């Protein structure tokens, strides 16, 4: 069973390179039995029925990312919570926990007004329930609950529509690059610490969200980040074949793709948030 994990397509804005790469992605995913998209597949908050083009974008990405066993499995991200109810996926054979990663901290960008409000709401929620949850299952569920309410009032914090505007938004205000670097440094360790509280053994953690691709050995596990299709980032694919897990840039995976049919394999055991009890 070959599994491919991709993330952060941010499909729907010109700054993303994902739309121009859909044909290449389609060729790549046909070599895999199963494809998982780890959040921010679309750059939209809206429910799918609100905008016809949103449904069309989702159809395009589902078609391009279908593996041999069928359409991709979508994990919700902070940019597209309306397209999925799946918070995480656990892959038994490789002991890999896949989740978007925004729940590891209350705030990603302190310079953004909507994120300041979300962070304040999370702090109030943690106080109301007796403190910030310390286990993965509780933290993920409670974080998404607060985020869902927040998204109703801030249905879409529109990202800059062009690559140049996106780059400007990363550099301004001046403290924002500092905050991004601080978050980059903290995020892998926070992800490993949270994954260690998962009720099953975790050897590998697959996260996204920060747009910083790479892998880190932390707390006896390997944390992988698959990057993004946005400027200043390298899109990578996490390839899982049985117990073997490796991260490679998408360009390298595409070069290695063979134009041969891949036999349909039986699905590996999978657990989702609805099937594990804390």
Image (cartoon, rainbow, N blue to C red):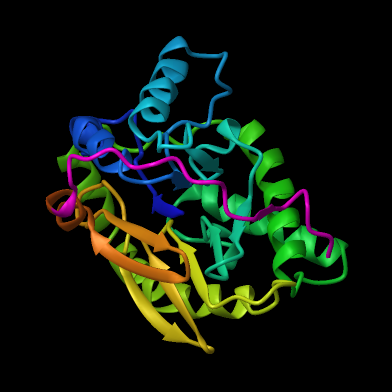
Pick out the residue farthest to the left.
255
Residue 151 in percent (x, y) is at: 62, 37
Q: Nearer the viewer, residue 40 or 275?
A: 275
Residue 171 in percent (x, y) is at: 23, 57
Q: Which residues are magenta?
A: 256-278
Residue 169 in percent (x, y) is at: 27, 49
On whether residue 266 falls in the magenta region, the answer is yes
The quadrant where residue 124 appears:
bottom right
Q: Is residue 164 above or below residue 90?
A: above
For this view, does 62 lie left or right of residue 154? left
Q: Nearer the viewer, residue 246 or 32?
A: 32
Residue at point 48% right, 37% down?
A: 69
Q: Is residue 38 above or below residue 125?
A: above
Residue at point 25% right, 42% down?
A: 28
Residue at point 74% right, 54% down?
A: 141
Q: Is residue 133 above or below residue 62?
A: below
Pick out the residue farthest to the top.
52
Pick out the residue farthest to the front.
263
Q: Is residue 25 above or below residue 5?
A: above
Q: Nearer the viewer, residue 41 or 182?
A: 41
How many badges with numbers are in the image? 0
Magenta region, mostly helix, strand or loop?
Answer: loop
The quadrant where residue 202 appears:
bottom right
Residue 261 in percent (x, y) is at: 28, 38
Q: Is residue 15 visible?
A: no
On whether residue 66 falls in the magenta region, the answer is no
Q: Quadrant of the C terminus?
A: bottom right
Q: Is residue 242 visible?
A: yes
Residue at point 37% right, 29% down?
A: 61
């Amino acid at each position: 069973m070959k599994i491919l994990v991709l993330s952060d397509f941010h499909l729907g804005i010109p700054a993303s390179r994902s739309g121009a790469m859909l044909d290449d992605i389609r060729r790549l995913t046909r070599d895999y039995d199963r494809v998982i998209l780890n959040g921010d597949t679309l750059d939209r908050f809206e429910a799918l029925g609100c905008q016809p083009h949103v449904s069309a974008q989702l159809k395009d990405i589902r078609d391009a990312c279908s593996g041999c066993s069928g359409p991709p499995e979508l994990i919700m991200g902070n940019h597209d919570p309306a397209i999925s109810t799946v918070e995480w996926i656990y892959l038994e054979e490789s002991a890999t926990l896949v989740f978007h990663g925004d729940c590891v901290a209350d705030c990603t960008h302190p310079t953004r007004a909507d994120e300041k409000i979300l962070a304040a709401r999370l702090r109030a929620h943690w106080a109301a329930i007796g403190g910030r949850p310390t286990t993965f299952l509780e933290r993920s569920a409670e974080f998404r609950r607060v985020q869902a309410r927040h998204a109703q009032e801030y249905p879409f914090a529109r990202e800059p529509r062009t690559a140049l505007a996106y780059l400007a938004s990363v550099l301004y205000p001046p403290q924002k690059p500092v905050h991004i670097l601080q978050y980059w440094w903290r995020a892998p360790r926070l992800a490993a610490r949270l994954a260690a509280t998962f009720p099953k053994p975790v050897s590998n953690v697959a996260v996204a969200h920060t747009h910083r691709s790479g892998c880190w050995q932390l707390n006896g596990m390997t944390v992988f980040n698959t990057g993004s299709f946005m400027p200043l980032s390298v899109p990578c694919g996490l390839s899982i074949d049985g117990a073997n897990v490796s991260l490679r840039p998408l360009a390298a995976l595409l070069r290695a793709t063979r134009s041969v049919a891949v036999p349909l394999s039986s699905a590996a055991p999978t657990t989702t948030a609805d099937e594990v009890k804390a």
